[in-house]
Image (cartoon, rainbow, N blue to C red):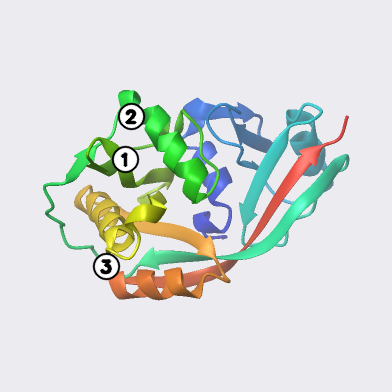
Amino acid sequence: MRHPLDRPIWSALAARHAAFAEGNALALRYAPDIHPFACGRDDGPESMQALAALAAPGDTQVFLQADEIVPPQGFVVSVVTEGVQMVADGPVAAVEDDRIRRLGDADAADMLELAMLTKPGPFTMRALALGDFWGIRDQGRLVAMSGERLKVAGMTEVSGVCTHPDFRGLGLGKLMTRFAAAQVSASGEQPFLHTYASNTAAIALYERIGFRTRTRMHVSVMTRLG
């Protein structure tokens, strides 16, 4: 049996994130205003046909899985790269820092602005629908954040970790990663995360926090042709 993290998008949408899913038993995607992630049940022709049918002309979708990604017919691929999937070896110790606050709907615009500036990965105004987020403000400006994204059985992804360029070098990225991972651990779940395979500095940082690489992942960004 395949590990649920081999196709984390499918595993999330088919279960804990089913309320945000569009599709059927062969292919699923998040509602576009929540996230551009999509995934087929497998790479068979029926799943690929169902996956293609989910996208309207001009729609861009992001794919993330351990298996090599097969573009559905009618899609043009704009990004193909390799990532790594990392899991926490054990519970992450609690982090105490009075600067960290839970973020809510009133913070969504600031969260999107920070994400657009730092590009931690796909992000939308409705990212908060997928899980909790936390952040640090300096004189009212959101300067660092982290949160939760994909949720599968017994596991939650740490995602959206970013720091404003003016505040880099202060350890805020490590702090926010540890904080989010500790929150996941405190809930009784195992934290996991993704980063690009080329981002050796991030991988080394996550290893120091207590994560280990589970597997290489394929990442593709595709747009449905008209």
**Type of amino acid at the residue the image marks with label 3:** Gly
CB under 8 Å between discs 3 and 1: no
Labels 1, 2: front one = 1
Label 2 sits on what residue type? Asp
The residue labelled by disc 3 is 90
At label 3, counting other C-alpha atoms closer than 10 Å, the crowd grade (few under 14, some 14-19, many 20 or more) is: few
- Residue at 31%, 40% in the rendered image: 142
Q: Disc 1 marks which amino acid?
A: Leu
Instruction: Determine whether, in the image, residue 181 is placed left or right of residue 148.
Output: left
Q: Residues within 10 Å of mark 1 (few under 14, many from 20)?
A: some
Q: Quadrant of the N terminus?
A: bottom right
Q: Earlier in the sequence, mark 1 or mark 2?
A: 2
SS at mark 2 in the image: helix
Look at 52% across and 46% down and name the residue there. 11
Residue 104, image x, y percentages: 30, 28
User: Is there CB contact under 8 Å for labels 1 and 2?
Assistant: yes
Residue labelled with disc 1: 142
- The span from disc 1 to disc 2 (Cα, nearest Å) is 9 Å
What percent of the width, then of the height, locates residue 202?
44, 68
Q: Kindly report the distance in space between the C-alpha atoms of the residues bearing marks 3 and 1.
A: 30 Å
Front residue of this view, candidates 50 and 99: 99
Query: At numbered mark 3, what does the secondary structure look like: helix, strand or loop?
Result: loop
Location of mark 2 (residue): 107
Residue 133 at least partly seen: no
